Image: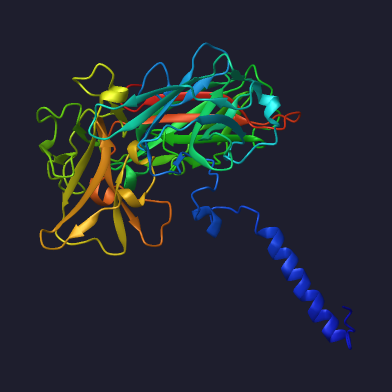
Amino acid sequence: MIFKIKNQASAYIIALVAIIIISTAFTSNLKFSDDDDDYANDSFLRYEDYTYDDSIKSVLLYNKRSVLSYPILPINGNEALELSFDDLRREYKIYYYQVIHCDANWNPSDLMKNEYVNGFLENEIIDYKLAFSTDLYYTHYKVTFPNSDFSLSKSGNYIVMVYEENKPETPIITKRFMIFESQVAIDMKVHRATNVSWQFHRQEVDFKISHENYDMPNPFENLNVVLMKNHRWDNAIHGLKPKFINGTLLDYDYEDVNVFNGGNEYRDFDLKSIQYQTINIKRIQFQEDQMNHAYILDDEPRAYRQYLSKADINGNFLIKQNEALDSDIDAEYVKVHFTLNYENPLPGGNLYLFGKFSNWEFKEEMKLEYDTLNSRYYKEVLLKQGYYNYMYCFVGDESKNKGDLSVIEGSYSETENDYSLLVYHRQIQDTYDRLIGYRKINSAVQ
C-alpha cells in the first residue's frame, strides 16, 4: 500500500516517528551507567565486588598467603589467588569463570583478551564439595588462579566474573583483584592530621614515589595514584598530583586532600562455635525454623565516648568452625541478630551493618529496622560460622553510595588502620594502565 504525503509538515511528522522507533529499538539492547535504570537489574555487569544472586553466600577472594589478605599479586612470582563461595540451592550447578582487564578507573580496558590472558579465556570451576550434614544444605565451590589452564601477562586492575555454564551474559559474582609491577619505590607514613581542627579525629597519609629506574617524562599526565584505607574502594582518594618534584622523586606531602577519618576499632563477634557462648555472643538457640539463631550482645553508640584501643582485623571476616575437620562444608549457616540501643530513630537516612561481609556496600539485607517500643535498631542476617568485624554506618537519604561511620562509631586519630597506595601509569606506547607500584602500611606499625 502506498500513501501520498500531502504536505511537508506531514512528511516531517512521519520521519520523526520513524526516527524515534528506530532509536528505541537500538537503545533497548544497550547497557547504561550506574545512573540509569538498567543498573538496577541483577544481570547488569558491574566492574566491582558484587553478588548478583541471593543464593550465593560467603564470597571470598584473597592471596593464598593468608585468608585475611587483599587480592593482589606481583606480576612475577609464584603467588596465587583463591576464590570461593557457597551456593545455597539444592541442585548442583556448573560454573565457569573468566577475567576482564580494566583501566585505573575500573572501566573495561582497550586490550583484547588474548593480549593479557595466556591459555583458555574461560575455565570451569571443577573443585566443589557438598555440605550435607549441616542444618542448611549448600555446595561449596573453590578455584585457585593463575593455574595450569591460564595466567595473566599484564599488570593492572581486573575483575573475575563467575557465571553458569553457557550464560556469560548473566554473572553471579564479580570480584576485583590487581596485579602489580615493582617499577617504583614508595615511602609512606601515617600520622595525626596536621590541620589543627582535624588532629583529634583524622589521619594524614604522606607519601613519596621514586621512579629512578622507570621512565616517566611528565608525572602530571598519565599518572594515577589511589590511596585506600582498609582496602575500601568506597572512600578511596583519587587524582592526587605531586606537590613537589625533585628529579625522579615525587612528593605528595599535603595537609588537606590526603586525610581520612581515623574511625574507630571495629566491633566483633566470634561464631566459630555454636556449642558454647563466645566473644560478644549473648545466646545461641536452635529454633522452630530448624536453624541456629545467635544473639549478639546489645551494642551502644560510641560517637561521644573516649577512644579505646582494641585488636581487630579492620573490617575483615574469617570463615571457621572450631569443631570441624573442614570448615568449608562443616560450618553452619546461622541467623545472627544485631541490636543497637538508640533512643530515637535517626532522621534523614538509614543505618546499615557495614564491613567486608557486606562487600563494603549498603545492601538492603544489611539495613537496620527501628523498634520504637524498645528504642533500638535491629537486624537479622544469615552468616556462615566464623569471626566477623562490623560497624554501624549511617547513609543519608540524598547520599547514594556514601556513608558516615562517625555518626554511631565516632572518629579518632589514634585508631589503627591499614593504608594502601596504588600507582598506575600509562606510557605513550601503551594502550592500558599499568599498575607500576603497590605499598601497604599499618598506622600503628611504621
Residue 28 falls left or right of residue 167: right
Q: Quadrant of the N terminus?
A: bottom right
* Quadrant housing residue 247: top right
Q: Quadrant of residue 318?
A: top left
User: What quarter of the picture does the C terminus occupy?
Assistant: top left
Q: Total label count?
A: 0
Q: Nearer the viewer, residue 258 or 15?
A: 15
Residue that extends furthest to the bottom in the rendered view of this protein: 6
Q: Nearer the viewer, residue 445 or 39?
A: 39
Residue beneath the point at 55% across and 24% down: 179
Looking at the picture, tell me which residue is in the foreground, 430 or 421: 430
- Image side of residue 148 versus residue 202, left or right: right
Colour mapping:
rainbow
Left-right relation of 281 to 196: left
Residue at x 58%, y 38% (from the top left corner)? 168
Q: In the displayed structure, would residue 188 be above or below residue 147?
A: below
Q: Picture coordinates of residue 52 (x, y %)?
A: 45, 44
The residue nearer to you, when weighing 232 against 277, is 277
Whether residue 192 is visible, yes or no, is yes
Quick check: 65 above or below 299? above
Q: Is residue 46 above or below residue 433?
A: below
> Residue 234, percent across and down?
43, 43
| Image coordinates for residue 122, horizontal then vertical, percent | 60, 27
Residue 98 position, x and y percent, is 57, 30
Could you tell me if residue 411 is visible in this image? Answer: no
Report the side of 182 relative to 112 (left or right). left
